[in-house]
Structure formats: C-alpha cells, structure tokens
Image (cartoon, grey):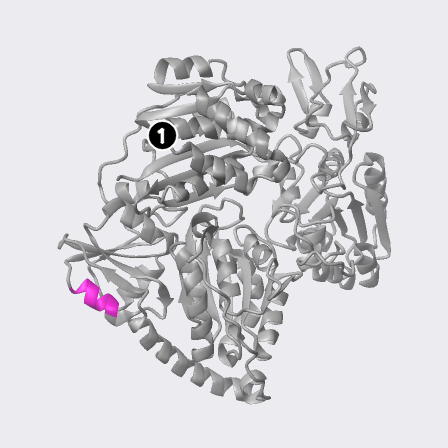
Amino acid sequence: MKKDFLTGNEAIARGAYEFGVTFASAYPGTPSTEILENIAKYKEIHAEWAPNEKVALESAVGASLAGARCIVSMKHVGVNVAADPLFTLAYTGVNGGLVLVSADDPGMHSSQDEQDNRNYAPFAKIPMFEPSDSQEAKELIGIVLEVSEKYDVPVLFRVTTRIAHSRGIVMLGERIERELKPYQKNPQKYAMIPGFAKKRRLDLKERLKALKEYSENFPYNKIEWGKNTEFGIITSGVSYQYVKEVFGDEVSVLKLTMTYPLPEKLISEFISRFERVYVVEELDPYIENSIKAMGYKNIVGKDIIPEIGELSPEIIREAFGLNKAEVYYKYDVNLPSRPPVLCAGCPHRGVFYVLKKMKAVVTSDIGCYSLGVLPPLESIDSILCMGASIGMGHGFKKAYEQEGKQSPFVVGVIGDSTFLHSGITGLINVVYNNSNSVTLIVDNGTTAMTGHQHHPGTGYNAKEEPAYAVLLEEICKAVGVKNVYVVDSYDLKAIEDALKKAKEKSGEPTAIIARRACALLKGKGPKGLYTVNQEKCRKCKMCLKLGCPAIQIQGEDVIINPLSCVGCSVCAQVCPFDAIEKAGEDK
Amino acid sequence: MTVKNLFISGVGGQGTILAGKVITRALIEHGFDVKMSEIHGMAQRGGSVVTQIRYGEKVYSPVIEKGKADVILAFEKLEALRYIEYLSKEGTLIVNNLEIPPSAVLAGKEEYPQNIIEYIKNNIKNAMIIDAVSKAKELGDVRVQNIILTGALAKVMSFDKEKFLNVIKEVVPEKYKEINVRAFETGFELV
C-alpha cells in the first residue's frame, strides 16, 4: 500500500478523492484553506472558490440534491456565515452525502475569535465527527459520507489548527467511483414552507434517534483500558493525542470520535468503572456539560483544564499535578518579537499612511490590511468580522447625525475579496439609507492573507482556468454609488485627493478603489529599487513612519535594504527633502 | 525507543519548510512513525516560524514539550534564543550564525541582543555554531543554507546519509539537485 505524509487538510482532500466526492466548494480561511486547494488538483472533482461560505454551502446543497457527494470547507467563523442554510438543511436532509468541514482555531493563531464550533452540532441538530490525526481524517471522510447518505443529514466534520496543519503518515487507497444518486422531485422534503418543515422537524427527531444508536456502536468511539483503576479520561480530537502523550497506556481513555450525538451508554459504561472521570477537551466544556447533564457528578473538566486557548501535553501534565517538564536553558532578557508586518512594497501601506495623516476614523475588515492597526501606522479603529467595515462606518456616522453633530471623517476600509464576500450588501445599505459614508476598497487582486487564492474578481477560478472578472467599480456604480474613484495605491496624492473629494460630498456616499496587485504576486509586483541619498537626508525619520521592512536604521543613517526594496516609491513620496531616489528599474 | 524531538525555528522565507519536508521524508524512510506540526500562517510576512518534528515507534502529540527537544535547529540566532527553553539537558543546539533584525530593531525601537553566540558558548552544553551563509555562498547559492543545516542535523542524529540524499533528489527540482546534494554533504561533514 502506498503511503504519504499529509497534513490533516491534505488528508481530508485525499479522503474526498478516494470516497467519490465530485463537488467541492469553499471560501479561503486559515486553517481550512488547503483543503480546497488540494481538492482542486483532482480532475475527478469539480472544485470552486465561492464568494463566501454561505454560497459555498448552498452550492454544495444543490449538488447533493442532484445526487453528488459533496464537501464544503471553511474556517470556524465561516460557519457563522453559512449557518442559515445549515440549520434548515438538517430538516431537508441530503441526497448525495454532504460534509461540512469546520476548521477551528483554538489559540487564535490566525483568527479574530476562538469560538468552539462543536456547539453547532446540537444547535443545528446534525451529527459531528472529530478526527485526531491525518490518517483518521482520511478514513472518516468515507465513513461520514456514508452516514450522511444513510441517515439523510449533513455532517459536521470538526478539525482544529493542530489537526489541519500537522502531518502524519497516511495510507493511500484507490478512488471508489460512484454514480450520481437519482434525483426525484420531493418538495415535501426539500421545499421548507412551514407545513412541510413541521413534518421534517419530526422526521429529524427520528433521524437523530437512529444516529444516537449508530454512535453507541461506532467503532471509532472506543475505550482503551489502562491499569490505573482510580480514574479515567474522556477526550476527543487532538486532545486525545496529548492525553496519550502524558499518560501512555497507564490510564483508561474513552476516545470519542463521533461527538454528536454522544454515545451515552458507552460513556456510562466507562464512568461506572471509576470513582472519578476527567474530561480533557480544548475550549468549551462541550463534552463535560453533556455528561453532567446525564446526571453524573464525579466529572472533572474545566475545573482543572483551561477553557481558553490551545491545550498541550504540558498543560495537561500541570492540570493533573504531574511533574512539569524541566526547563534547562533560559535566556532571561526580553527578546524583540517578530510580529507580522505589511511586506516591502505592500500596496496597503500608503493607503493607511494617508488615512492616518487625515486623522480618519477607520472601520476596517479582515485581511492583510488588518495589519494597518499595528505601529507605526496604527490607522485602524475597528476590526470585527468579514464585511463589517462598511456597515460599521455607516452606523458610526448616523449616530452623530441623529444628534445633529458633526461626525469625524469615517472611512470603511475593506479588501477586494472581503468586499465580494460580504461587503456589497453593506454598500447597498449605505446607498439605500441615504448615507454619505466613504468606502475604500483596497484592491490587491487576490485573497492575500490566506496565500493568494483566486476570487470572482481575479479572472481565474480555483482550477486556474480563465473566468469572468467582476469589476469592483461597476458593482459600486450598479448599487447606486455615484462618486466612484479608482486610484493607484502607490500614488499617495491621488489617494488623498480622492478622500478629500469624498469628505466634501456631504450628502452622497463615495467609493474609492485603491488598486495595485499584491507585491508578492508572481510577475505582478514592482521591480525597482530606491535608495537614500545620504547627503540630502536630514534624519527626520518620516519614512520610518511607514513601517516598511526595507527601511532601516544603520548607525546614524537611515538606509533602504536593496535586498528587500521592490521599488514601490511610497517612501520617496513621503520624504519631505526628496532624499529618497530611484536607483534602478531592475534588481 | 523513546520518541525523539526535533525543533526547527527560523524566519519566514528561510526555507525551514523544505528542510522539514526533507527531514520527515527521510525519517519515514528510516521506518519511523513521524509527526510534524507547523505554524506558518504569517510565514510570508517575515514572522517567526516553527516546525516541530517527532519520530519513534509510535508518536502521539504533534507538538514538543519544553525541555524535551533533542535538537533545536535554528536558522537564525535570535530564533535560537526565543525557543531555547525547549532544548533538553543533553540536547544539541545547531545554530546558523546569521542575524535577521526584526522590524522593531530596523526602526531603531528595540535592540538586537549582542551577545547571543557568547551566551550559547557559555551556557549550552552541546552547541554547534554554523556559518551556513558563507558555506552556501561558496557553493554558489545562498538559498541552500537550509540544506546545509539539514546535513548538520542528520549527522548529529546519526541518520543514514544515503536516505537523506535520496529524498533530496526526490523533492528538489532537477536543476537544483546537484547543489542541494553538495549542500547536504557540506553540512554533514561540518559536524
């Protein structure tokens, strides 16, 4: 048998391939992005980037209705966006198997929150599975597709960053080809008017009952008996690996893989053997509370296990009062950190410089440009969720106007991919509600933060085939914004002029599109070089306020590192003494 | 055998991910169970990057505990210090004698620690300081630092050289094969 060394995400993609998936959709988001990127490599599967997670899920539901096996993947907060179709999908059920992968991010390595999406399973009333490594992730994809089809439900497949981005050995199998399941018109099942929905609600209850029975006998929910008779541990997902790391085969472990519905009989059988049972789980006391609700009192969970952040073997060791790992070497001086920064040549830099200069209140959004909140730019006032910038900017102004007061200059800053994800409706709201708010779309022609995925505006699809490119300025005009300006993100004066014009339009909304390709996009970034003329430089350090990693202090001088500089010219525009000069077209 | 832990640290863009790929594939060739964890969300943006590799008969956790790394392979001096608590008592620190100043240092707001090599020499029981930059330049491509460092690690852990060379030939594009093979051998012989 062939084997490979795969991340959890690659293993999920492999599982989709082996178990006959033919339709996949997603919106990029760490730590889920690589699932669709890898699925897109299989010609047997139609793979697409959707503008947002809701559309991704709805498209998959359509494909499932037609009889295809489907997989939809997104980060945890993406499930919030897709929640509307998800909840009713539990009522209608599926035709072809449908798996929703939620990649959660405990510890918030790359997210704005660390919500525990296991809570969605009982909330939406859909079965949930949690793999504990790559091999299991691949195997389970096949099983959950069968569960989805047999029990007529969508399945929540929940992974976390350490599953999604850790590699393990995976045994590869062949693809099992599968024909579309036949489609039969059945509005009582698929068209949820209240009269039909009430029946499906009752049917869902029966389906969940059957799923509970399935969970009791599901072989991946299993007890590994140990010698210790004092206590046992119930765990799931990556926490299982940490528990085994700490306790080995010494302590009995109930490993839960299907975590909704929970196998209550199996859990009771396990608990009955011990005086005390610990629940080791990351984030919320999801399993713990379910077991306590069964009436058990000898359960210890979040009393000793943190409910914030990632777990680790060390944290578990400490929680159980075991020997902490000894630290042998320690360097006691604070080290300079390496926070992420906007890259040299990043087209967002100049935009934020101008906004700061104009003392704008900036409601911003999710993407690389979120880094504009950090020093030295510090231009951003708020970041909430995908698309929030436009609505928040609008509401902020309205609050002042309602009191008859002059609002500060408010600008909603949003990226191109985020605008297409959920910014358009915000902009329609601005126009509809007679707002004069300012929307600034920083268009770098890609979904940059997650590693350059295409979106409906890039002209290519997930398979790198040419596609229609949606034009942002046309959308802005079409929804009714009359003042639309397109400027070059490297042209600070043009950005400032457009913002000034927007400020003067007291009664009408404005949309400004600051456009320049991401400097890291192959073949699209600038290829020049600037240098500091030391004779002209007066060491005022204005250029350092840009926070460009290419601009450095060297002894007394400010210099531009020729290895980092790409020649965007923004620093030259900022220098009050014309001391920064072009030094070449190519490097 | 007990599970062994290899901790790789560096700065985004230094080629730690390729090094991790070569090492793990070679470990699988040795017949081990292997797990690897990477945090690289911000890797393109000059952030601190970490790759954790664990191997043995059966590996559970994909992450390494403090005080338990058999080797820390640091691609940059500051990134060696940042994770030094992970090194086990008898563990070996292999550090690239290279300084990449973080943004706050470049902007003159913080200082890059001046005494790193001295600290390592005086305090770390088993330490190897490697000038991979000059060695890579001698070979003709500064980017092969990562494979030079990988070679040093392979020797320190007494791995089978041929298995590594086979993996390098497998994963590196044709035109870079020869230089990477030489880079590995250079690193292997430095120890």
Q: Is residue A47 above or below residue B86?
A: below
Residue A585 located within the stretch drawn in magenta: no
Give coordinates of residue A187: x percent, y percent. 58, 88
Q: Going 78% across and 35% down the picture, which residue do you hit?
A: A526
The foreground one among A272 and A138 is A138
Q: Going 18% across and 54% down the picture, which residue do you hit?
A: A226
Q: Is residue B132 visible?
A: yes
Q: Amino acid at mark 1?
A: Ser
| Majority SS type along the magenta span | helix
Q: Secondary structure at mark 1?
A: loop
| Residue A259 figure quarter | bottom left
Residue A270 located within the stretch drawn in magenta: yes
Report the span colored magenta.
Answer: A266-272
**Residue receiving disc 1:** B158
Quarter of the image that includes the N terminus of chain A = bottom left
Quarter of the image that includes the C terminus of chain A = top right
Pinpoint the chain carrying mark 1.
B
